[in-house]
Amino acid sequence: MHKLTDHHIEALYKFTRNHYVAWYVVQIELVDHLANGIENQWIENPNLSFESALATEFKKFGIFGFSDVIEQKTKALNTFYRKEIWKYFKDFFRLPKIIATLFSIWGLFIIRDYLSLIKIGEMSPK
């Protein structure tokens, strides 16, 4: 029975990068999946080459390859980050902070109006 070497693992990472898997977290998951599949194939057929086992394992992902996995991960991450942003938004706008925020905005408008009155006064003819 064969075991994957560090060279094989690095080849799997390169394989995933060559197939447009940019996120390292997704690469780790795919490399683990591919490595397990290749080792299972080697249990059944010890004479199988690494490249043949990799090609057989990659065919299991279908004609679109890793794109379905990337799409699922993208949707999951978008959902996760949308929830995180909403959580921070709700945490920020609690009662004392919302009053301070509204007061600050009101103060900025007062300052803006005051500065525009000063500027108009300087530019008007005497």
Image (cartoon, grey):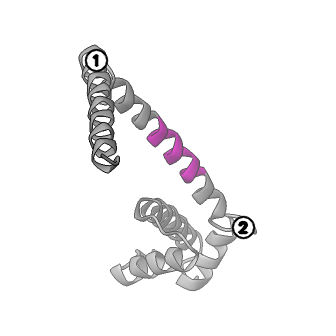
Left or right: 106, with 11 as reference point: left
Give the amino acid type for the residue marked by disc 2 in the picture: Phe
Q: Is residue 81 magenta?
A: yes
SS for callout 1: helix
Residue at 43% across, 31% down: 86
**Residue 23: quadrant of the picture:** bottom left
Mark 1, residue position: 99
Q: Looking at the image, which is closer to me, 8 or 19?
A: 19
Left or right: 75, with 10 as reference point: right
Left or right: 63, with 38 as reference point: right
Is 53 above or below relative to 93? Answer: below
Q: Which span of residues is magenta-colored?
A: 72-82
Mark 2, residue position: 64
**Residue 6: quadrant of the picture:** bottom left
Mark earlier in primary sequence (1, 2):
2
Picture quarter with the N terminus: bottom left
In the current view of this chain or complex, which residue is farthest to the top? 95
Res. 92 in view: yes
Crowd around label 1: few <14 · some 14–19 · many ≥20 (10 Å): few
Q: Nearer the viewer, mark 1 or mark 2?
A: 1
**Residue 116: quadrant of the picture:** top left
Name the main secondary structure of what is drawn in magenta: helix
SS for callout 2: loop
Crowd around label 2: few <14 · some 14–19 · many ≥20 (10 Å): few
Residue at 67% across, 68% down: 65
Left or right: 100, with 56 as reference point: left
Q: Is residue 8 magenta?
A: no
Give the amino acid type for the residue marked by disc 1 in the picture: Ile
Instruction: Locate residue 52, reporting x and y percent.
Output: 62, 82
